[in-house]
Amino acid sequence: MINRETPGSSTAAPLGNRSALAKTATVEAGGSAAGRFDSRDTGSALWLMAPALVLYAIFSLLPIAATFWLSFNSSAGFNTASSFVGLDNYAATAADPIVWQSLWHTLLWLIYHVVLAGGLGLALALAISRLKVTQVFFRTAFFLPHLVSLAVVGVIWANIYDPFYGLINTALTELGLGAFTQGWLSDPALVLFSVNVASSWQGFGLYMLLFIAGLQNIDHTLYDAAEVDGASAWQKLVYVTLPGLREVTTFVVSLAMINGLKGFATVFVMTNGGPFYQSELITTYIYRLAFQSQDHGRAAVLCILLSLLAIVITLVFNRWRARLSK
Amino acid sequence: MSTRHREWPVVLGLAPVMLLTLAPFAWLIVSSLKTEAEIGQADPYAWPADLMWRNYQDAWQIGGFGELVGNSLLNLAGVVLLSLLTCAPAGYALAKIRFPGREWLFYTFILGLTIPVQAIVVPLYQVLFGLNLVNTLSGIVLAQVSSGIPFGIFLMRSFFISVPDELIEAAKIDGASHLQILTKVLLPISTPAIQALVIISALSTWNDFFLPLIVLISPEVQTLPLGLVRFASTYASEYRLVFSGTVISFLPVIILYILMQRRFTEGLTQGAIKG
């Protein structure tokens, strides 16, 4: 599925696979001279592209371009006059300690999410894929949290973490482990991790499905060969399974990082960035600057930072994946 | 025989992990049927003396969940329909027609696939405001369709690329136009791709919070996740209402998933890998 050597696989690695695209072009060019196009084909293509292109231009491309413009202007709110201020917004952003804090929290958030959700997804996939009779049952059960909206997950886990009536503290007290109860969302050292557990609880199901698909793609004769050589279960895991999962792993890690980067709803619902900005992410700070402080210039600078992070993550992982698939 | 032998140890190991994973659901459902006083006893292992189905009636009425579900369904129908109508033709053009600027367009859509919607939210709001679309369901539908277009196009394109060219050449010789090729030849054999696009766009629309938070301001137009968050903060001290409202918000999708889990699983896996 992921390994397929068709030009279509370039979509799984869009940025890292120009050669595949070039291949499609040459194949389809057939015998005609390169650069010549049938004008009727071109006309139909434009009509077929038009609905998507119009919507995308108005609601995605225009805003992408306008974000740069906004970052060089100051404005006191929506629909108020703005003035060109050069790099002032960039300077103000760099001097804002909360920006650096939210950037640090976002990086920690990414790491927590990759380790918690990605790790659990991999561990469960390894266990579940060995099952015959109960595989579908466990796969279905473990996937259930992924169906819940992250905003609803926020409401659920805000109640789970409730210090007096929440599931965790009451369950610990009833078990005689009252000493372990915490202010899960009020302790500045704990809050980011606590909220991330909620997000990762929602996220691991998809990664688990992807790892299961990856495991099913591993050539089964490799296991038979290992068995003939007298390999132990551990050796088969280390020398056959894990190398066979390398490609899907880079995909899951990049997906988890991008999902982590977009993390917003659970933090917004559970803590709104608090206490004292201790769970503020770049996304929640963008929302605060844009829609509460009405400081669009500085919000736009952070938007550009967020886009750059997303682009870098995508490029690095596509490069890596392209190298693996060679 | 050896697989049978291995099944049960793994099942025994997985069972406690599954109980922990699903404990939040069980706790919420049981708590949602308790009285306020029983919730106040803070004993998660206690069963309610009487099942308080009234909590659901009260939450449904006070929270206006009927309206929220209705809005969410309209929102979902609009996004799924428009996504299919925009992404299938565009995916076909990018996959099977040679035209100038194709590669350039391809990279333009990759840009949109990479940049998160949170990073364009300020001007996006201004565009919607300028078009009088703030606080309307049409506004949220257009914004969501647009942010899903790159993914949808790549999904359809990668499926259409795998269709042999001979099929299309044969239709061309019979005098079919590109639109006819798409609707009469390709779409009838594209069920897996359409299924993946429908499931993924439906689920992400139903669960979306960020765009509705920005676009949908008055309660009458809000969707389910946004409405639940507003409800839960308004009635934060009435746990029985918050719990039953939360169960109302997640249970329907979970039941739907259990009923058609094979399609969901296929669609989500295919979509994630190809998109």
Image (spheres, coloured by chain):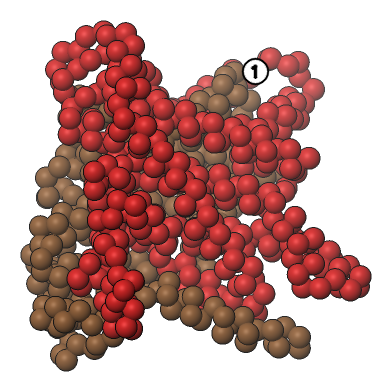
Chain colours: A red, B brown
Q: Quadrant of residue A195?
A: bottom left
Whole-percent x and y of residue A273?
27, 45
Q: Against A118, is A285 above or below?
A: above
Secondary structure at badge 1 equals: loop
Q: Is residue A112 above or below residue B63?
A: above
Q: Nearer the viewer, residue A27 or B155?
A: B155
Q: Image point 56% across, 21% down: which residue? A: B104
Residue ranking furthest to the bottom: B49
Residue positioned most to the front: A179
Height in image: B186 above or below A155? Answer: above
Residue B205 at x, y = what percent?
34, 50
Query: What is the chain identity of the residue bearing mark 1?
Result: A
Q: What residue do we see at 34% from left, 52% from top?
A: A189
Residue A21 appears in the figure: no
Give A200 or A140, whichever is nearer the viewer.
Answer: A200
Q: Amino acid at mark 1?
A: Phe
Residue plotted at (23% across, 39% down): B214
Left or right, A257 with respect to B160, comes to left
Q: Residues within 10 Å of mark 1 (few under 14, many from 20)?
A: some
Residue denoted by label 1: A37
Which quadrant is home to the C terminus of chain A? Answer: top right
Residue B171, located in which quarter of the rendered image?
top right
Number of numbered labels in the structure image: 1
Question: Is A68 located above or below residue A97 in the figure?
Answer: above
User: Residue A95 in the image: x percent, y percent?
Assistant: 32, 22
Residue A302 x/y as whole percent = 35, 28
Residue A103 makes an appearance in the image: yes
Instruction: Please state if A233 lies on the left or on the right of B69 as rendered.
Output: right
- The residue that appears at 26% across and 76% down in the rendered structure is A170
